[in-house]
Image: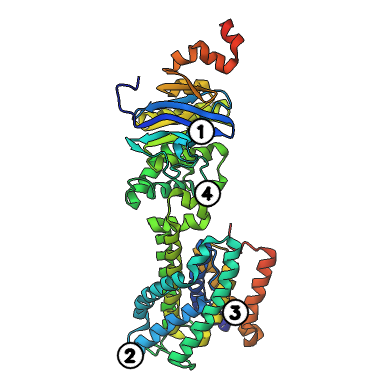
Amino acid sequence: MSGDRQGLLQLEGLTKAFGGLLAVSRVSFDVAEGEILGLLGPNGSGKTTLLNLVAGALRADEGRVRLAGRDITSLPARTFQLVRPLSKLSALDNVLVARLYGRDAPGFTAARRESLQLLDVVGIRGKADAPAAHLTLMERKRVEIARALATQPRVLLLDEPLAGLNPTEVDAALNIFRRIRDSGITVVLVEHNVRAVRALCHRIIVLNYGQNVVQGAPDDVLARPEVIEAYLGKASADFQ
Amino acid sequence: MTILLQNAVFGLLIGGLYGLGAVGLSLVFGVLAVLNVAHGELIMLGGYVSVWLFTLWRVDPFVSVLAAGPLLFLGGAALFRLLFTRLASYSEEVRIKNSILIGFGLALVLQTLAILAWGADERAVTPSYAGRVAAIGNVVVPLSRLGAMALAFLVLGGLHLFLTRTRAGTALRATADDDQAATLVGIPIGRIYLTAFALGSALAGVAGALVSVSDAISPAIGLGWTLKALIVIVLGGMGNIFGTFVAGLFLGVAESMSGFLLGNAYREVVGLVMFLIVLSVRPRGLFSR
């Protein structure tokens, strides 16, 4: 599917071993600009390791990562998995500071206006002046997403952003992500929640034992026997 | 009653300067975790800027503020580069302890240099309006002190706008909150440290020039101002500009009242007693949330 377009983010034969354990083994794929790519796989299948390799938090043993054609494999960390909120600052200031020191930062007034819009996108405009320490977990996640967007990343890497949320909150979060998707940003999403992945992603890739098992449109991939096998075991795949 | 009110007014007027003197120290401590005990000496230097400009060219002390601020900004930046930069890589606790040592050394050096340069005598600025007062009922308000207080309030308002309405100010607050998280956002905290220290010094310079409007300047005034600033910061709570200002007013009034009611010898004691009580009962400060 992505063969006809030059990918914004390109992975070539990425491999990472921890001791004798091959966590990621020769994984290659492209992410097109504006695409939302879902990474699925059972626990221990190497999703988070792969994300860390892309983010530069881990060094790959082999393989290349390219962003817009430029080799970024061995550059220092580009994103941080753990967003650390500034707890005494207000929600707005948290987003504002990220906007002011992000890519293509505008002047203060414009940055403030954009930050308020981002708080609107994630649905907590009403809490703009509340200190981050006073927000609930869900609200803090929203601030984190707004902060991530405020830095105007070329690619947004999200590692299980829906973890720990109840079904109502998942629905609310899905609405936020739909708006992010519609804004045209490129996203690589690691997520266990199959419903969320189906609703959001243009394409998904399933990893198992650190290898790229299958990729394609969400509905096709999720119906494939080898995917069901990877998730539920062989017997259930036969049963299907 | 009138005398009480009169004392309260004097207390308020001097208290505004206590607040301004403390804000710079509070800013530096909040952002860098550096306790610059030579802050009072920087106030002293600001006072001498005003004294000299007046002695040489009859420059009005309120105008000298415009020189004392920028001069101490540059001086503060140089001092930071020279003495405090290398502290930045240490943990907060080590930083605070060592900064106190460095600060004491710096205070001694600055005091001695001031004595060498200008002698140990007190020097005063005597503008034409020095003794003028406005009378409200039976209460007398010295105009020069009222002007100093108004300007102190304006400067603090400007500082508030800087911290909440500019890029650098926002970064300063983020760094004060959590310097590691600030680094993650991409804030160059080395530069923010430098800015905070220089800005804190500039505020000391402005405070010093305003002190010279109504009080004599001598090389020895520094320690007293550092102590007042520490008391005010403890009363007002960290990182709260207007809390600090109100605490300054509070200390000013408390000193002047107790000086009147208990005798002048007890002026200073009251501040220190309040300092100890607040530290043991409400260490976050009277005005912090």
Mark 2 vs mark 1: in front: 1
Q: CA distance from mark 2 to mark 1?
A: 73 Å
Q: Are marks 3 and 1 in contact (CB under 8 Å)?
A: no
Q: CA distance from mark 3 to mark 4?
A: 35 Å
Q: Are marks 3 and 4 in contact (CB under 8 Å)?
A: no
Mark 3 vs mark 4: in front: 4
Q: Residue at x 49, y 93 (%)?
A: B120
Q: Chain of mark 2?
A: B
Identity, as a three-letter code, of the amino acid under mark 4: Pro
Mark 3 vs mark 1: in front: 1
Q: Nearer the viewer, residue A18 or B284?
A: A18
Labels 3, 4: one chain = no
Q: Chain of mark 4?
A: A
Which residue is situated farthest in the top direction here? A239
Q: Residue at x 56, y 61 (%)?
A: B90
Labels 2, 1: one chain = no
Q: Quick one: quadrant of the C terminus of chain B?
A: bottom right
Q: Are marks 1 and 4 in contact (CB under 8 Å)?
A: no
Earlier along the polypeptide chain: callout 1 or callout 4? Answer: 1
Earlier along the polypeptide chain: callout 3 or callout 2? Answer: 2
Q: Nearer the viewer, residue B120 or A187?
A: A187
User: Residue A96 location in percent, x, y?
Assistant: 41, 48
Identity, as a three-letter code, of the amino acid under mark 1: Lys
Q: Which residue is mark 3?
A: B255
Q: Chain of mark 1?
A: A
Q: Nearer the viewer, residue B259 or A148?
A: A148
Mark 4 Cα within 10 Å, few/some/many (few <14, many 20+)?
Answer: some
Q: Which residue is mark 4?
A: A131
Q: CA distance from mark 4 to mark 2?
A: 51 Å
Labels 3, 2: one chain = yes
Q: CA distance from mark 1 to mark 4?
A: 40 Å
